[in-house]
Image: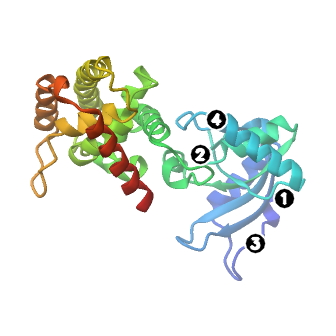
Amino acid sequence: MAPADLAAFPAGEAPPKSIRNLAEQVEADGGVALAAYREPVGRNWQLFVILPLAKVKATPYQRDISKAHLEKLRKAITKLDRFVDPVVVIRGPDGTYWTPNGNHRRTVLEKIKAATIPAILLAESDVAFQILALNTEKAHNLKEKSLEVIRMYRGLLDEQGRKHEDSFAFQFEEAYYATLGLLYEEHPRFAGGAFSSILRRVDKFQKEPLKEAFEERQRRAALVDKASGILDKQVEKVKRRGIRHPFVKNFVLARCNPLTRARKTLPSFDTALKRLIENLENFDASAVRYDEVARAGVMVAAAASSS
């Protein structure tokens, strides 16, 4: 269908020139623009297109491919013998299309040697940075979320470095994801889950330009890394006493948590980490008993299963 023939729009309402131009670019890129329409929530104009698969890439900011999920998805698509779930894409200046939420589906089509992929093409390029909100293909774990956020952060530094960090709260979801992302980059096996309950409460978005805020993120990550190193040493002391319960690290950190009694008024990030580091340094590993660790582990597991 030629761009001039786009007709899937409300009676008496033609798509704007920008959408028609975008459709022409799709055709020039070797794709087909099937329809222009307004999505039902914000009434934004979008295109439904068929694109050459070779031109569709994942945004460089999102998580890595999960081999297990990829194989599960491949089997499902192969068994169904059809592809029914279009990916969302934006068009780059070089004619490449980025998908912020369909990389597993895109990769499956690559593996089964498909030539094209159906897609919903958005005109707004900033959607590429709204990955966490858009990605419903596979639930993120903490490490994946954190790595995606820090990758987005680095991309935004180049494009929108003068904007304040707190203006990207929607894209990043939680401020501490950026801090943990830096740590996961350096230490892929970092115990982010153990620290998340503390960081979630004291690590806030900054009212500073991204470039300055990123330096502060690095400083905060260094403080958490310091606390983690001391925690590891205390955990090793406990384990040397024969207490090798899998909840040991969480138990020690919980005992040293400076926010345990903080309800209404929370300390600043620096104050909280300073107290945490002091508590960890003064922790008496010789006083830990196996039954305490085991009981705490059971209580946490029970709370998690009931939530």
Give the label, 1 or 2, closer to the camera.
2
Residue drawn at (74%, 45%) of the image: 72
Q: Report whether residue 25 is seen.
A: yes
What is the CA distance from the residue labelled 1 to the residue labelled 4? Answer: 35 Å
**Label placed on residue 65:** 4
Q: Given the image, on which type of amino acid does mark 1 rest? A: Ala
Q: Can residue 307 be seen in this view?
A: no
- Which amino acid, by three-letter code, is at mark 4? Ile
Q: What residue type is labelled 3?
A: Ala
* Residue where numbered disc 1 is placed: 2
Q: Residue 8 carries which label?
A: 3
Instruction: Examine the rendered structure and indicate whether residue 224 appears above or below residue 208.
Output: above
Q: Badge 2 local density, few (<14 within 10 Å), some, or many (20+)?
A: many
**In the image: residue 165, left or right of residue 49:** left
**Disc 3 residue crowd, few under 14, some 14–19, many 20+, Cα 10 Å:** some
Structural distance between the alpha carbons of marks 3 and 1: 13 Å
Mark 2 vs 3: CB contact within 8 A = no
Q: Please tell me whether mark 1 sits on a helix, a strand or a loop.
A: loop
Q: Considering only order in the chain, which callout, 2 or 1, is on the residue closer to the N terminus?
A: 1
Picture coordinates of residue 22, whole percent (x, y): 68, 53
**Image quadrant in which you'd find residue 37:** bottom right
Label located before the other in sequence (2 or 4): 4
Q: Mark 2 points at which residue?
A: 100
Q: Which of 46 and 165 is in front in this view?
A: 165
- Vertical placement of 222 versus 200: above or below? above
